[in-house]
Amino acid sequence: MDKKKVLVAERISDKGVAKLQENPNLDVTVNFEIPREELMKIIGDYDALIVRSVTKVNEELYDAAKNLKVVGRAGNGVDNIDIEGATKRGIIVVNTPEANVISAAEHTIGLMLASCRNTVRAMEMLRKGVWDRKNLKGIELYHKTLGIIGLGRIGTLVANRMHAFDMRVIAYDPYIPDSRFQRLGVEKCETLDDLLKQSDIITIHTPKTEETINMLTAKEWAKCKKGVRVVNCARGGLYNEQDLAEAVRQGIVASVGLDVVVDEPKPISPLIQMPQCVVTPHLGASTYEAQDKVGLSIAEEVINVLEGKMVPNAVNLPAISATELEDLRGYLKLGVTLGKLYYQLRKDAVDKVEVTYEGEAVNQETTLITRAVLQGLLKPVLRERVNMVNAELAADTRGITVTESKVKGEGRMNRVSIAFKAGDKTFTAAGVVTPDNQPHITEIQGYRFDVVPAPFMIVARNDDKPGMIGQIGTLLGAGHVNIATMQVARKKEEGAAMMVLTVDSNVEKNTLDILRNLDGIVDAKMVLL
């Protein structure tokens, strides 16, 4: 087996590099400061690219990266990666959102404390030989109101830790359910204005999007308490820095703690020179522990993708935890299997796919299962790469309408059923996932089975009459085909039946042709899973 080629183009921890190099199936190149011109020349040879925040992974790079299957971003943000371009090419983008969250949360609190207590200004005065405390009075956090904008991973960690300071914690995040606020003991603000008016200290923990850039401007600072304290360890530009500097000059904002600024790594922010501000050069993830975790995590993610496994931190797939992913594996395999059946048993071009979930299946991440169905359907017939990332887009560009429905109710069987429609023709297939996470095919075109999918299967339609099983068994035996399992389903009123056989190897074309010509056989197809 040819080794997969991995290029590590920006620095990750030694442990992360070692993790990659220890894998016998990988050929790893480490060049932490590779020039762009050289990168563009060689990227076409690589299956995986690992970067941090400097390398621009854009259309120019994708056009040259003909073999690229995964981009690993060692860190949280993906501002330097064109996600849409990756998605349409079926390139999986993974990052490490969990690896540095503790370090980022602790640095947030460190900046909060340093800015509230004038720590840096005091140190600078001492270094100048000045011992003078009268202009260095700060504030206690005790019983102050902390306003958190964005109650995601890091925002949650900050909230949990600041409860220990006996702070009142409020938060604004329209995408988080009320139950999470209640579970965290955090008061929910229905609007950003509600948070601004109440907060003594504000910290922001949102991604950088069109919605959040310049989220706080002069208009928002004017709504705050006079003397509010501000922290940002998320992304530069979430606060408008020019407006924030003016709010500091006007005394609206008493102090600022920043770890991120606009135009990194050559910032021009006026806040850097202001004595009321504590500014650090993006140190949120700069701990030994976080860097080791980031390196190991991105190495594991990239290896999993190259080995064909699903990963929880795929940026261009629906968010899902590692535990949920493990529970979902059987359903994903079932989805791919049911999708693969169609074009191996039918040839009409599909224009609609209807997926129905019943019983326990409705509680799964059905979006991913539906994508798995589309991957199985389209991969055998398209030249370009089709996977979980771009299956939905591939279906859309081919005019295939995809619908999902969920049927709930007591006593419902745990079931995924699919109707593939081609004009006025419909082909149906269904399956279940057993408690051991094993998919089973339970229906094909109205015939009921209980078949565990196998790599080699024969699906035969035949007249419902004596001797059919014996004929097929004898013929396959003569062709040196070993039958593993055989199941037969009948439509007695129609005088028709269907057999599904799992066999140990592929069946030669001449053997299948003889099988199709047996008396009573309507059709027989080889299915490769």
Image: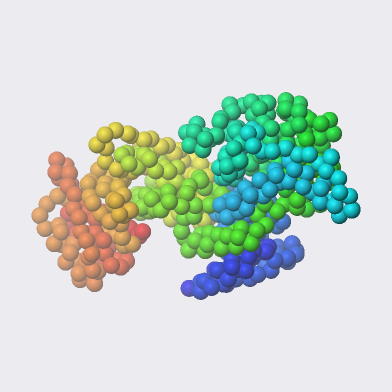
Q: Name the residue located 66 percent from the left edge and 38 percent from the top edge.
A: 141
Residue 180 spot, x, y in % from top left: 49, 36
Q: Name the residue located 26 percent from the left edge and 41 percent from the top edge.
A: 413
Residue 352 spot, x, y in % from top left: 42, 39
Q: Is residue 168 left or right of residue 326?
A: right
Q: Is residue 18 visible?
A: yes
Residue 46 position by quadrant: bottom right
Residue 108 spot, x, y in % from top left: 67, 46
The front one of 250 and 97 is: 250
Residue 310 spot, x, y in % from top left: 47, 55
Q: Name the residue located 59 percent from the left edge and 51 percent from the top edge.
A: 102
Q: Is residue 461 left or right of residue 334?
A: left
Assign the C terminus to one quadrant of the image: bottom left
Residue 406 position by quadrant: top left
Q: Is residue 378 visible?
A: no
Question: Considering only vertical position in the picture, is 51 above or below 84?
Answer: below
Q: Is residue 385 left or right of residue 114?
A: left
The front one of 54 and 82 is: 54
